[in-house]
Every structure is written in C-alpha cells, then in structure tokens.
Amino acid sequence: MLPVDEIRLNFNPASLVILNVVLGFLMFGIALDTRGADFRRVLRMPWAMGVGIAAQFLVLPAVTFGLTLLLQASPSIALGMILVACCPPGNVSNILTHRARGNVALSVSMTAISNALSIVLMPLNFAFWAGLHPTAAPLFRSIALDPAEMAGHIVAIIGIPFVLGIVCAEKLPRLTARIRKPARFLSFFCLIAFILGAVAGNWRYFLDYVGLVLLAVVLHDALAFLTGYLCARASGLQDYDRRAVSIEVGIRNAGLGLVLIFSFFGGLGGMAVVAGVWGFWDIIAGLALASWWGRKPAEGAPDTTETGA
C-alpha cells in the first residue's frame, strides 16, 4: 500500500466541471435565504457576530494546526484538515441551529458574512497555516499553489452565485419564494451525490486509508464544535447564542474543500480522504448535537409562549 501522501485520487474532469456548477448552485441557494437585513442585523449584535467570525477564521485554524502536530498527521492529511478548517459554513448549519433551538437569526447572518469573507480569507488563511506547518509546508510548496488563483476560483463558485442569489432574493421575492426550498434541497442532494461519486470512484483508496483519517476527522470535528462553544462562552454570550456559534464553527463546507482539492491539488490522497470523510461525519455529528440541545430550551431565548392581544 502506497503512503497516503503519494496517492492521487481520480475524478473525471467533466464531472469536476459539473461539481463546480453544483457547488455554485448550492451557494446560490444559500443566498436565496439571505437578505440585506441579515447584514444589517450585524449592527444589532456586533459582539456575537464578531466572536463567531473570529472563532471561525482565527481560532479554528490555529486549533486545527495544533491538532495536526499533536496527532503527528502525515503532510497530506494535515493539509486536508487545515483546508477544511478554512472552509466557510454551509446552510445546513442554519437548519441544525433551528433544531438545536439556538439563535437562527445569528446563524443565518454568520453564514452570509462568513461566506462573503471567505472569498478573500480562505485562500490567505490556508496559505498561511499550510506554509507554517513543519512537515506539510514542503509538500504545500511543491504544489506551487497560487493563492490568487484559488481566490479567483472561489469567486467563481462562491462569490458570483452568492451575489446573484442575494439580488434574486431582493428583486424577485415571488420567484425566490417558489424556488428557495427546492433549490436548497436539490443542490444539497446533488452535492452529497457527487461526494458519494468521488468516494465510490476511489473506493479502494478510501477503504485503505479511512482508518488513518477517521480518528483525526472525529477529533477535529468535535474540536470545531467545542471551539465555537468555548469562544462564545468565554465572551459572555448566552446559551441561545452559544448554540448558534458552536454549530456555525463546527459545520464546514467540505464539498468546497473537495472541489479545491481536485482542482488545485490533483486529488492529493490524504486531503481528499479527509474532506470526503468530513463531509459525512460533520452532518452526523451536527445532527446529534442539535438533537441533544433541542431537548431543552436555551437560556436567553426569546419567550414565544406569550400571545398578543
């Protein structure tokens, strides 16, 4: 069995183009649930928003970097973990926050702001932490990744569809109301289908190497949720907000990571296996956490039992 750093997973170029389109459609669906009010809402809860954004873009990559050193992860696995940590959240975080009885308004706003910021911050963040890693940096430099080129790719599959979705939501509210839910579920279904396709097409590699990454992914995912929760708690946010921040930081868009891995890293083994396993485990862990939280009311939640006259 070849070392995980030496394998390259195969993905048909035509399928990769379709996956880019699907991911762009997914971002369009996220934007259909976004309004200008979501960005203006930041002004009414700047502290909670600031804590959540900092936890995602500053604390989580640093925690991930430390975890890769602690686990002595192989270079390609370390790069995969860092890339996933730098990805923005997906709109499934809003669904899970609602299930967890957390602050959905904060969750939606964080998703919108985080995806907008990730266009610039994601490639810079990844390049910084990957270049700093003692064992993964040589592999990262050998790939000769251009952060500007990655940023351009992210603009194409995140930025443009996101802006178009917001414009559609603001200017065509009736059309948006009809297509929002079908678009969200269809795009999510297609993304899961393509992740399954990537796994099925490289099933032998996943079977050979999943044991190497499963513990890392489980620990990493748990730390991501915990990072959001502890940052929110340390900053004095109430439980209602802590649940939203924890889920926003814990849920990463591994589908985007998989697209970038096949587009810029040639399907590098450890990276692709990490992103593929994360894409499934993250949803399972998030659903379990949200269901557990949903059993009891959140401290600081608005009282919905009162009825108006």
Image: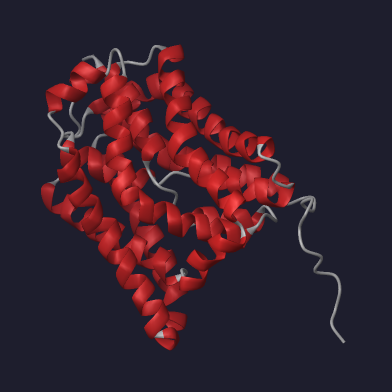
Image quadrant holding the C terminus, namely: bottom right
Image quadrant holding the N terminus, namely: top left
Q: Nearer the viewer, residue 90 or 245?
A: 245
In percent of width and height, residue 173 lies at: 44, 84
In percent of width and height, residue 152 lies at: 18, 51
> Do we see residue 196 in this rendering?
no
Identified at 35% across, 61% down, the residue is: 27
Q: Nearer the viewer, residue 183 or 104?
A: 104
In this picture the colour scheme is secondary structure
In percent of width and height, residue 227 lies at: 57, 33
Q: Is residue 167 above or below residue 1?
A: below
Identified at 49% across, 28% down, the residue is: 220
Left or right: residue 272 versus residue 179 is left
Q: Quadrant of residue 157?
A: bottom left
Identified at 32% across, 42% down, the residue is: 122
Q: Quadrant of residue 141?
A: top left
